[in-house]
Amino acid sequence: MSDAITTLLKRNRQFADDFDAADLPILPKLNAMMLTCIDARVDPAHVFALSLGEVVTIRNNGGRVTPAVIDEIAAVSFMVAKMTGAAPTFDLAIVHHTQCGVERFADPDFQRALKDNTGVDVSDVAISDHDQSLHDDVQRLRDAARMPGSIVVSGHLYDVATGAVRQIIAPHSLRP
Ligand SMILES: [Zn+2]
């Protein structure tokens, strides 16, 4: 077994020894969902001091709104509506971060080389301006007919150099 997996399993044994969260409800305690980057430096459990069961998290390259992300949120929204009998009103916080890998995707040469070598087109997730990309992501959600207008969206930028999160887009109903 690799050193990494040995370390992780050892840590989990400690976690399981101390475990006392067997009765957590399926719906997150803070009634919130977060979309953020896969970057190991921006783990929301650390950045927002989350406890187990508080927030649903979706992560991808950049924390961008993609068709796959929209599918995930639509599925969760449907499930929440079935469970609660009401339109979902959870917060959806989009959290991008400084020094993000997807800033490299904005380089046309890199983008072309990536597509030539892997077939992956990252043009929709590339970031050259963080404020703009957050506004674009909110717009993508708003344009998706299967997104419930009742969810509350917001946009934030995490600075990996200071640990601080700055709110760029204040929380508001997706379609008032
Ligand atoms: Zn990133």
Image (cartoon, helix red, strand yellow):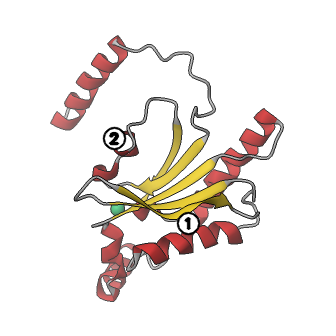
The image position of residue 48, as x and y in percent, is 40, 43
How crowded is the residue under tag 1: few (<14 C-alpha within 10 Å), some, or many (20+)?
Answer: some
Tell me, for residue 66, which label it has, or none: 1
Q: Residue 66 lies in what quarter of the image?
A: bottom right
Query: In this view, which residue lies farthest toward the right?
Result: 85
Position of 83 compared to 160: left or right? right
Q: Which residue is mark 2?
A: 46
Ligand 1 placement by image quarter: bottom left
The image position of residue 159, as x and y in percent, is 30, 60
* Foreground of the two, 10 or 52: 52
Residue 120 visible in rendering: no
Dots 1 and 2: beta carbons under 8 Å? no
The residues bearing labels 1 and 2 have C-alpha atoms spaced at a distance of 25 Å
**Residue shown at 27%/67% (left/top)?**
99
Q: Amino acid at mark 1?
A: Thr
Tell me, for residue 112, which label it has, or none: none
Q: Nearer the viewer, mark 1 or mark 2?
A: 2
Q: Amino acid at mark 2?
A: His
Query: In this view, which residue lies farthest toward the left?
Result: 3
